Image (cartoon, helix red, strand yellow):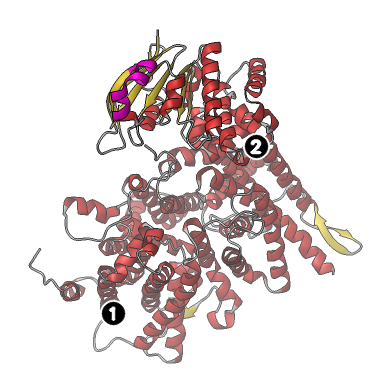
Amino acid sequence: MRVLPGNTLLRHLLIAAAGGAALWALTYQLELYRDYQLATAAAYLCATAGLTVLTGLNGQLSLGHGALMAVGAYTVALSQDKWGILSLSLALGVLAALAAGLVIGLAAARLRGPYLAGVTLAVAVAVPAVTTTWSSVFNSDQGLPVALDPPPGTLALEQWQAWLAVGCALGVLVLLANLTRSRFGRDFRAVRDDETAARLAGIDVARTQVLAFVVSAAGAGLGGGLLAVLTQSVSPGAYALSLSLYLLMAVVVGGLGSLAGAVWGALLLVFLPDLTHQLTVGLALSPGAAQRVEGNLPLAVFGLTLVIVMIAAPGGLQGLLRKLVPFRTITPLPKSEERPVSDAQRT
Amino acid sequence: MERWLFLTTDGLSKGAVYAAFALAIVLIWRATRIVNFAQGAMAVAAVYVAYSVTAATGSYWLGFAAAVLSGLVLGAVVERVVMRFVEHAPPLNAVIVALGLVLLVQAVLGSIYGNEYRPVGTPVSRTGLSVGGVSLLSAYDLLVFGAVGLVVAGLALLFTRTPVGLRMRASAFAPEVSRLLGVNVAGMLTLGWALASAVGALAGLLVIPTELGLHPNAMDLVFVSSFTAAVVGGLDSPVGAVVGGLAVGLVLSYVAGYLSADVTPLAALVLLLAVLLVRPGGLFATTATRRV
Amino acid sequence: MSLLRVQGLTAGYGGAPVLSDVDFEVRAGTVLAVLGANGAGKTTLLRSVSGLLKPTAGTVSFDGCDLRGVRVEHLVRRGLAHVPEGRGIVAELTVAENLRLGGLWRADRDAVRADLDEVYGLFPALAARRGHAGHQLSGGERQMLALGRALMARPRLLLVDEPSLGLAPKAVAQVMAILRHLRDTTGLAVLLVEQNVRSALAVADEAVVLALGRIAAAGPAAALRDDTALRHAYLGF
């Protein structure tokens, strides 16, 4: 493994540059709707990468990341409407999600396990309520359009979107990869593994948790903003509770705590519905049934995957891969036998 | 004043449902230290069973019985097939598995019944009886109070007065010791999940006709409100869950009535946060606060 | 005749075994004391006997019947009661409920009622506090409750884990006296795990000394009491 430089930042930048170049070349080869799918996966990746750092590395479960994506998306829509400068809009989207993440994170730092899950669930469920309560701004269920300038030159819109989203996602990955290898990453894991021990080691537990939440929220905000740019509209229905659950599914299946796992998860989010679509076409159902099944089959597969992976392989895809190809990675969540909670732990 | 009276009775009626649902959450929490986030989805599944049975037979009450029964079965199956494997894992795993179940159950329901709201009938009128020109309790409200009252009293008797109840409590508090005393702890867990799920199904049956109707997501908000209720009551206390349920019902009813029905999810969120941050042990906690 | 026979028992929690190749037997109507320092594997031994911990090798047979494959919750029906370390009472339940729990599996309701009266007779302190929750009891009372609750199952063999732990000398003496009384009057056999060597040897008929998971010595309690070299080496008095 000594072909890559020892400096962490340099190594990550090199990997990202190589990946970016390969994907850039790829966008010329792909059909336009594949470019669009690539862009969507990259947008999800911004969010899943953030979530896997929060849940996998810091042990905080958030069901509110769909809502944080909505914050990013609505901010981009409003900013595009007012100023029309895309880079500014995306930056504002990140900032807005960051601020929302700070608020939730401050509360989250005082909450544990199911309580945190419950609060973030309440956040996710409250998104439509926000858009209807302030409907003059958010336009209730209809949502807002996202105004976009045409892409430069003769570039196809989808290809340009792919460049934009992939570029952003690579940036997020590089930043998070460095963060997790830094002192902050170690603090995240220390707090996850044993709060008391972390506190005794001089780590400010609450501040670490808030930081993890804020970083993670920024990723979700960027992902949401990109998604708004891709779909050119935002509505509460696109950012419902199920989106949060999808994101969670993605990071769990990919392998909690692993950025590579977040990539797997994001790809799965885009291509699994594709697969299930092929499946329903093959099933030869009546039109009505086919429509119902097609809309719900991805959900069912996601749900089932979540249950099975959590029970059978808590390390996720990346965990399985790691068993086959050992290389430097971030420690995943401990398995059950390493962290027993039964009352049977005496000799 | 009239409006206040109406909102109060309406809030208590909703609160009774939240109380039942919160009670189901508390039952499972006490037995396994798991918050069953799938409880809403499981309850909706049972109500769909009621919907089908009622549509086929024309009898509301047959559907009602079928829903409670399928709630029992579903709870037992979920515990045996899925939850058993994460009971000793880190708490995060159980929450994630429950959320996977939410997706799965909702998807299965959506595939069978479609994702549109279906109106659900009630056996008795929901129009309030008029007392001196003020519309007050409806017959349906009385049914809700009666049903929830019976369930609460039944559970209280079961847990405090019967051998099975004693076994269930002992299993929850000290599983290993209970096994040494001959208690089938695994069986008690399954029974606990079955009972909780049946109570959840009943709550779903009662509340869904009073809201938008039957939909795979119909219980999402009810779950949040009831979770809030359970937390208000301290999450560990059945009595707290009932009181918390009524309190949350009232608060949300006043918010909906005096502000806007649209903001009730926000109100539930604020209430939940306020309780967790100010009195993490619940409003009725007498002992030292727990870690939340 | 031997009521409990343990042969070649090896057990642990993954990693190195805590117990290796342990053999002993308990005869009906006798008290066998298992002595040894902290960490010698005494609690592990009891947990392996009652199946809370699955042994990695060896057999445990009770009354001529191999206990492998017998579920923990069925042991008490066969006449084997285990009083776990730390006086495993259910602190949230009342004294009366704890005692009721002990005999809940029995079908002979009248006999259970009679046994309850007997337990209250044996432990008058419990009778006075039957409505109190477990967590309101003193250490000695908790130990008595745990013993009394085990007796509600009418066991033939009682596994008792460190009953003297944290008790005042007077309470220890009381507990030991009750064990002796039960052996003498009802023919109860007791497998008594203890760090308090003097008290244990005072009541035991036979004893084994456990050191680092192996049997270091075994024999009649009186002989162990008199073996100065052994006492110095393993028992510290």
The structure residue drawn at horizontal position 29% and vertical position 74%, both measured from the top left corner, is A172
Q: Amino acid at mark 2?
A: Phe
Task: Name the residue nearer the viewer: C114 or C105.
Answer: C114
Question: Please, which chain is the residue tagged with disc 1 on?
Answer: A
Confirm whether residue B254 shows in the render.
yes
Q: Which mark is residue A164?
A: 1
Residue B3: x and y in percent read 81, 68
Residue A266: x and y in percent read 31, 64
Mark 1 or mark 2, which is nearer to you?
2
The structure residue drawn at horizontal position 69% and vertical position 69%, both measured from the top left corner, is B256
Q: Secondary structure at mark 1?
A: helix
Q: Does residue A53 sit above or below C112 in this rendering?
A: below
The magenta segment:
C219-233
Q: Does residue A149 sit above or below A97 in this rendering?
A: below
* Residue to which mark 2 is pinned: B159
The crowd level at tag 1 (other Cα within 10 Å; few <14, some 14-19, many 20+) is some
Viewport quadrant of the N terminus of chain A: bottom left
Task: Name the residue nearer the viewer: A79 or A275.
Answer: A79
Residue projecting furthest to the top: C1
The structure residue drawn at horizontal position 56% and vertical position 74%, both measured from the top left corner, is A130
